[in-house]
Image: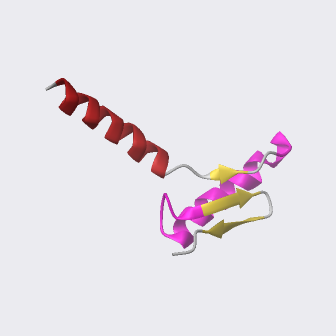
Amino acid sequence: MKKTVLFGAMSVALLGLVGCIHVDEGDWSDSEDIARNTETALRVCGGPGTVEKVTENGFTCKQD
């Protein structure tokens, strides 16, 4: 029983990490540009887990 609960908790934690998006470090004044580009990247690339990188200048989608 404990193993099942532990496995379930680990699965939930790992699924949460799948949707992470890498954002380059930069000036905090760029945060509005990065937020806008993140929203656009999620729409264009197909959702969480499909965006490779977001910067203040643009974004890249993950290759299949």
Residue 18 part of the magenta segment: no
Q: Is residue 63 above or below residue 30?
A: below
**Image spot of residue 25 (x, y percent):** 79, 45
Tell me the quadrant of the picture where the N terminus can be found.
Answer: top left
Residue at 59 percent across and 59 percent down: it is 39
Decide if residue 9 is on the left or right side of residue 48: left
Question: As rendered, which of 24 and 34 lies closer to the eye?
Answer: 24
Residue at 54 percent across and 49 percent down: it is 20
Q: Is residue 52 above or below residue 28?
A: below
Decide if residue 17 is on the left or right side of residue 2: right
Residue 50 part of the magenta segment: yes
Look at the image and name its color scheme.
secondary structure
State which quadrant residue 57 falls in.
bottom right
**Image spot of residue 9 (x, y percent):** 31, 32
What's drawn in magenta, residue-wise? 26-51
Q: Is residue 49 above or below residue 60?
A: above
Residue at 48 percent across and 45 percent down: it is 17
What count of labels does the image hold?
A: 0
For the stretch drawn in magenta, the main secondary structure is helix
Q: As drawn, which residue projects farthest toward the top?
A: 2
Q: As drawn, which residue projects farthest toward the front?
A: 3
Decide if residue 63 is on the left or right side of residue 25: left
Q: As drawn, which residue projects farthest toward the left?
A: 1
**Image spot of residue 3 (x, y percent):** 21, 29
